[in-house]
Image (cartoon, grey):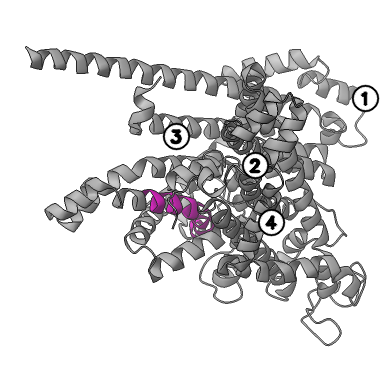
Amino acid sequence: MPASHSEQRSDRRARWADSIVLRTIVRRLLLGLLTLFLVSVVVFAATQLLPGDAARAVLGRDATPDRLAAFRREFHLNESWLQQYWSWLSNLLTGNPGTSIANGLPVWSGVEPRIVNSLYLLIVVALVGIPLSIALGVWAALRRDRLFDHATSTITLAAAALPEFVVAIALIIVFATIVLQVLPPVSLVAPGTSVWSHPTVLVLPVATLTIAVVPYIYRMCRGAMIEVLESEYIEMARLKGTPRGVLLLRHALPNALAPTVQAIALTFAYLAGGVVVVEYIFGYPGIGQGLVNAVSARDLPTIQLIVLILAAFYVLVNIIADVVVILVTPKLRTSS
Amino acid sequence: MTTQQDTAPSAPEGRSRALWLDVLARTCRSRRGLVGLALVIPIVLIAVLGPFLAPKSPTAFVGLPYAGPSSEAWLGTDGIGRDVLSRVLWGGREILALAVLATVIGIVVGTALGTTAGYVKGALDEAIMRTLDVALAFPQIILALLLVSIIGPQLWLVCLAVAAIHAPQVARVARAATLRTVEQDHVKYAEAFGIPRRRVILGEVVPNIISPVMVEAGLRLTYSIAIIASLSFLGFGLQPPSADWGLMVNENRIGIQQNPWPVVTPIVLIAILTVGVNMFSDAVARSALGIEAPIAPPSMSGSDDALGGADHVATEVPAS
C-alpha cells in the first residue's frame, strides 16, 4: 500500500515534470519561430537599404530605360516593401526562393551544393573538435594545477583570443607556403565534384575552425569536471575503492556533460558566423563564401536566402542547447 | 565557490572607488596580468606613435612590388611597391580606436539598460530584457556583416555594429549584478531617505556593480579587436589605399611567397594584441571575482550568450 502510494506520487510527479519540460520546449520552439520571422524582416529590410539601384547595378550603367523597367518588373523591384516582402516570404515558404540576380539561375541550385559543403566542414570540425576538447578538459581537470593543466589553460586562453583569419593565415604560412608545402593553401573544388575527391582541401579549414571551437568547450568541460571531482559522492566512491576508470566514465563524466553539451551547442551556433571568414580565406565552396560572393555581386535573393539559412541554423542550435540544458539539469526540469 | 558578494563587500560609496582601483592594482601585480600588459603596451605604442615614426609615407611607391627587405625598406614592399614598415606603423590606429570606442559604447549602453532594468523591475524590466533576448537570438555577426556590406564600409557603422553586438550581453551582466546590489542596506537607506531614483542608481548601484562590468569590459575589448580586425580583413573597414593591419593581410596574401612581411607583421601584431588583452582581462576577472574569465567562442562569435556573463561562469567554474 505505501509502496503503490509513493509509486503513484512519483508517477504523477514525473508526468507533471514532463508537461513542464514539454511546455518549455514548445515555448522555446515558438520563440525560435518568432525570432526567425524577425530575422526575415530584418534581412529583407536590410537588403532594401542597398544604396543605389539593384537593377542598374546588375544591368550596368548604359542599360536602356526599357530594360531597367522590365528588370524591375521581373524582380518586383517597383512594388511596395510590404508587397515585396509578402511575395518573397510566400515564395520562400513554398520552396521557391527566386532566381539569382547575378546569373539568372534559380537561387536554390547555387546555394544547395554550398550547404552540403559547409555541412561537411562542420561535421568534420565536430568529429575532431568535440572529442579533442573533452579529452583535454577531462585530462586537465585530473591533472589540476600540474604542468599539463597550466599549459593547456594558457594555450587555449591565447587561442580563444585569436581572430580566425589570423589563425588561418598562420596555418597557410606554416603548412602551405613558406615553411612547408604539404597542404593546399586554397581549397579548390571543381563545380559538380565533391570535396571528398580531394580530402586534403578540408585540412586547413578544419584545423582553423577546430582551433576556434576547442577553447570554450575545453574550459567548460574542465571547470565542470573539477567541480564534479570535488563533490562528496565522488569522494565516497573513491573511498569505496571504485576503480579509477569506472569512477571517471560512469560517475564523474556524465555529471560534467551538461555544461559541456551546452558549450558545444553554443560553439556550433557561433560557427554560423565563423564559416564566413574561414571559407572566404580558403576559397572553400561553402555557404559562407557564397555569402561574400553574393554580397559583392549585390545578388539580393542569394544574400537573403543564405543569411536566412545561417540564421535558422543559429536559432536551431540555440534551441537544441536550451532543450538539452533543460533535460540534463534536474533543477530546471522540475521547477516551473 | 567564490561569489560576487564574498569579494565585493557591500561597500559604501567612496570606498567603492578604491575597490575597483584595488582590483586593477591586484591585476597588475598578478603574473598573468603583467604578461598581458607586457604584450599589449608595445603594440599600443606602435599603433599610437607609429605614424610619427614612419620613415616614409604609407601611400608612396618606393620600389618594385613584393621586393624583399633591404636597407631602403626594412620589411620590403607590398603588392604595389609601398613601404611595408611605414604601412605597418600607420595601420594600427583605426583598429585600436574603433575597438576601444565600440567597447565603451557597448559597455555604457549595456550598463545603462541593465542597471535600469534591474533597479526598476516590473514592466520596464520585462520590456528591456525581452527585447534584448530577441537581439541575442540573432546571429549578430551575420547581421553586422550584412549591414556593413550593404550600407557600405563606413567606420562609424562598423563601430556601432560591434557596440550593438556587445550591449545585450553587458546588460545581462549589469542587471544580474544590480539585482544583488539593490538588496543591500545602503541602497535601501538611500531609498528610504527619498533620494531620487537617478541618484540612487548613479550613486549607490553603479559603484557596486563596477567589478563585474570591468570583467565584462575586458572580455568585450578582446572581441571588439578581433571582430574589427576581421571586418577590415574582409574589406569592410578602412578602404584602400589606407594602411590597416587587417586590410594589409588580405591585400598581400597572394604575394606571400615573394615577400611574407606585409602579411606576417600585421598578423603577429594583431595576435599579440588580442592575446595580451585576453590575458589581462582574464587576470582582471581573477582578481575581481575570484574566477576565471568567461571565455566565449572567439572573435566572430554571435552567441557569447551562455558563455556570457561572469555570473554564469561563477556557477560553473570554481576558483582555481
Q: Residues within 10 Å of mark 2 (few under 14, many from 20)?
A: many
Q: CA distance from mark 4 to mark 2?
A: 13 Å
Disc 2 on helix, strand or loop?
helix
A172 and A236: which one is in front?
Answer: A236
- Whether the residues at callouts 2 and 3 have beta carbons within 8 Å, the answer is no
Query: Extreme left residue here?
Result: A1
The percent position of residue A326, horizontal first and vertical second, equals: 39, 29
Task: Tell if the residue under mark 4 belongs to the same chain as the one under mark 1.
Answer: no
Residue B155's disc is none
Residue B21's disc is 4
Q: Which residues are magenta?
A: A202-224
Q: Residues within 10 Å of mark 1 (few under 14, many from 20)?
A: few
Chain to which mark 3 belongs: A
Chain to which mark 4 belongs: B
| Residue A218 within the magenta-colored segment of the rendering | yes
Q: CA distance from mark 4 to mark 1?
A: 67 Å
Residue B208's disc is 2
Residue at (80, 60) in percent of width and height: B244
Task: Tell if the residue under mark 3 belongs to the same chain as the one under mark 4.
Answer: no
